[in-house]
DNA sequence: ATCATGACGTACG
DNA sequence: TCGTACGCCATGA
């Protein structure tokens, strides 16, 4: 669920938890680019990339978080569910991301946070 | 309150 | 290349 508001946080970027912070970073990844669990983790200041995966897994509905643009450091899709993995692949494909077999060339599509 | 569980990355042998 | 250890969140039973 989403219980991030105690009722008085608005203009300040204060997050009740790590997942909210992760979602804000993922929202910055533009169409046509991909990011990795590790990169997102680094940007929110944590060393555990798994937590980024946990955060993505916890998304129940679309909160404007482009979860499909987050893949692993090997350039592959990490979703365990084959169906959803294919969905993710299709979504990336429709955004212009090309696959070489089952992986994406990160040197060509990795998001640069400075952009 | 404890326990299991789940989309990872890096270091090391 | 492969297996293992570690990092240490959020949620539901």
Image: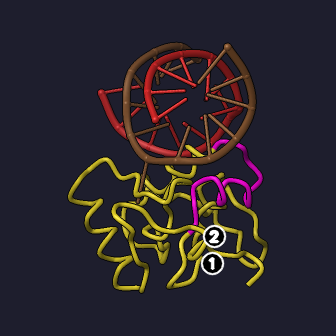
Chain colours: A yellow, B brown, C red
Q: Please report the bounds of the magenta region as a residue range.
A: A35-48
Q: Position of residue A19 (x, y in %)?
A: 59, 55
Q: Do callouts 1 and 2 mark residues in contact (Cβ within 8 Å)? A: yes
| Tag 2 residue | A24
Q: Secondary structure at mark 2?
A: helix
Q: Position of residue A105 (x, y in %)?
A: 51, 68
In the image, what residue occupies the spot 64% across and 66% down?
A7
> In the picture provided, is A76 more to the left or to the right than A36?
left
Task: Note whether C6 is above or below A66 in the view shown.
Answer: above
> In the picture provided, is A109 more to the left or to the right than A112?
left
> In the picture provided, is A78 more to the left or to the right than B2?
left
Q: Residues within 10 Å of mark 1 (few under 14, many from 20)?
A: some
Q: Which residue is nearer to you in this view: A4 or A94?
A: A94
| Tag 1 residue | A28
In the rendered image, the quadrant that contains the N terminus of chain A is bottom left
Quadrant in the picture for residue B6: top left
Q: Secondary structure at mark 1?
A: loop
Task: Note whether C6 is above or below A2 in the view shown.
Answer: above
In the rendered image, the quadrant that contains the C terminus of chain A is bottom right
In the image, what residue occupies the spot 49% across and 60% down?
A75
Disc marking residue A6: none
In the image, what residue occupies the spot 38% across and 71% down?
A99
């Amino acid at each position: 669920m989403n219980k991030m508001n105690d009722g008085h946080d608005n203009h300040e970027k204060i997050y009740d938890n790590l997942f909210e912070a992760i979602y804000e970073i993922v929202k910055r990844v533009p169409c046509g680019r991909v990011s990795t669990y590790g990169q997102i983790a680094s940007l929110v200041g944590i060393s555990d990339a798994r937590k980024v995966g946990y955060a993505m897994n916890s998304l129940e509905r679309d909160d404007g978080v482009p979860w499909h643009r987050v893949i692993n450091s090997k350039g592959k899709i990490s979703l365990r569910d084959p169906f959803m993995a294919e969905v993710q692949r299709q979504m990336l494909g429709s955004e212009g991301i090309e696959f070489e077999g089952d992986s994406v060339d990160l040197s060509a599509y990795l998001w640069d946070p400075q952009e």
